[in-house]
């Protein structure tokens, strides 16, 4: 019998999260694909943006070059390891892949490899560990990112592998890619989560570094195909968390999508990932943003969800409102 997928196709991921209950029905395993075409200012996972493996450095964990120094001994070129106050602070090399050995010998995890090269077979092995839970709960696998379709061949083979094993499939995507790629993946997906950042094209470009025109066209295409779809909006103060933007989004869903979505989930922004940015030698873009108290912001999201429901849009705050698919 001909195999329904290629187990040897390889890709780069940055995490596999088991027992997730927020990214689709039932109990799920979420596979995070590394790489993204957007550059959202509020991204809390900077390690997800580049598809290549990267090294993160945490100076506070370093016990000192004089006491340890194993990273320098293992490094192909010691001059690439920048030391300040007796601690490793960063690695300056165009080919960081050569320095992953430094992470493997560090006894305190002061150097971390962001990303892992894996095959479809290796991911499937992890996913199948919880197949009984999927069958009992109606769960399955969810592909996320980064951008789930940034490595299309790898992602599509993963979806095929899951289908071959009778596992329910979900995918979360920003839809910023060619429709041809989307059309190849859609038949393999049971439920699609579409991220929508902002309705205003210029502000979308300002906040994410890309236009929203292709994204909106792809959302229309997905909904017209009849694929069960949930729209997710990360609601960020002073960026897209305004009544004006929420009303514009609701009108788009009502008028352009004919309201044919399962749900809109308004996700509360949290200041997360600052340590990851620092480990990569990057400044956190939202460092100066003043955010409301958690309870205040959660009430704001409830109010914004109510605004969307005025247009007949099934909007909720958060991801805890489960629906049947």
Image (cartoon, rainbow, N blue to C red):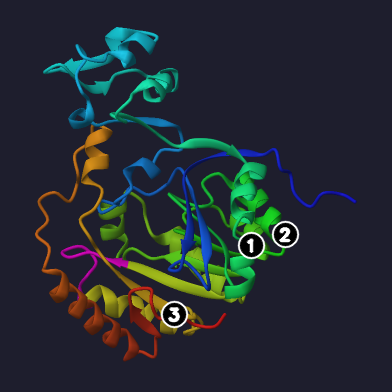
Q: Nearer the viewer, residue 133 or 262?
A: 133
Give the CA separation, mark 2 to mark 1. 9 Å
Q: Nearer the viewer, mark 3 or mark 1?
A: 1
Pointer 1: what residue? Answer: 131
Q: Nearer the viewer, residue 184 or 57?
A: 57
Q: Please give the name of the residue rendered at 24% of the width and 53% of the height, measured from the top-left corner.
A: 272
The answer to whether the residue labelled 2 contacts the one labelled 1, judged by CB atoms less than 8 Å apart, is: yes
Magenta stretch: residue 241 in it? yes
Query: Magenta segment range?
Result: 234-243
Q: Nearer the viewer, residue 58 or 177?
A: 58
Pointer 3: what residue? Answer: 263
Q: Please give the name of the residue rendered at 18% of the width and 31% of the height, measured from the top-left corner.
A: 60
Give the CA separation, mark 2 to mark 3. 28 Å
Q: Please give the name of the residue rendered at 29% of the width and 82% of the height, measured from the top-left corner.
A: 305
The circle drawn on residue 165 is 2
**Residue 276 location (% of width, % of height):** 27, 41
Residue 139 in view: yes
Helix, strand or loop at mark 2: loop
Up-down relation of residue 231 to residue 40 (above or below) = below
Magenta stretch: residue 145 in it? no
Disc 3 packing (10 Å; few <14; some 14–19; many ≥20): many
Up-down relation of residue 147 to residue 244 (above or below) = above
Q: Main secondary structure of the magenta part?
A: loop
Q: Is residue 307 left or right of residue 129?
A: left
- Residue 274, picture quadrant: top left
Precedes in sequence: disc 2 or disc 3: 2
Q: Is residue 105 left or right of residue 288?
A: right
Precedes in sequence: disc 3 or disc 1: 1
């Amino acid at each position: 019998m001909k195999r329904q997928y290629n187990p040897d196709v390889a890709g780069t991921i940055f995490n596999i999260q088991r027992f997730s209950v927020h990214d689709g029905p039932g109990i799920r395993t979420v596979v995070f694909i590394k790489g993204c075409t957007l550059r959202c200012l509020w991204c809390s996972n900077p390690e997800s943006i580049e598809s290549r493996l990267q090294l993160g450095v945490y100076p506070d964990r370093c016990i000192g070059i004089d006491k340890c120094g194993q990273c320098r001994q293992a490094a192909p070129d010691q001059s690439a390891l920048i030391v300040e106050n007796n601690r490793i602070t960063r690695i300056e090399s165009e080919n960081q892949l050569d320095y992953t050995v430094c992470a493997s010998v560090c006894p305190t995890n002061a150097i971390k490899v962001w990303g892992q090269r894996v095959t479809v077979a290796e991911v499937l092995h992890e996913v199948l560990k919880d197949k009984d839970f999927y069958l009992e709960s109606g769960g399955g696998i969810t592909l996320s990112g980064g951008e789930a379709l940034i490595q299309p061949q790898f992602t599509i083979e993963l979806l095929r592998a899951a289908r071959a094993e009778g596992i329910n499939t979900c995918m979360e995507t920003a839809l910023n890619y060619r429709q041809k790629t989307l059309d190849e993946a859609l038949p393999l997906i049971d439920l699609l989560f579409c991220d929508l950042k902002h309705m205003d094209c210029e502000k979308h470009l300002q906040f994410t570094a890309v236009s929203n025109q292709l994204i909106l066209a792809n959302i229309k295409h997905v909904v017209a195909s009849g694929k069960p779809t949930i729209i997710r909006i990360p609601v960020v103060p002073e960026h897209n968390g305004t009544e004006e933007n929420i009303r514009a989004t609701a009108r788009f869903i009502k008028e352009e999508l004919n309201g044919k979505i399962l749900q809109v989930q308004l996700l509360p922004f949290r200041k997360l990932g600052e340590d990851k940015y620092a480990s990569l030698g990057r400044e956190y873009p939202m460092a100066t943003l003043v955010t409301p108290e958690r309870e205040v912001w959660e009430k704001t999201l409830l109010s914004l969800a109510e605004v969307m429901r005025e247009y007949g849009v099934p909007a909720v705050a958060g991801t805890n409102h489960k629906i049947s698919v």
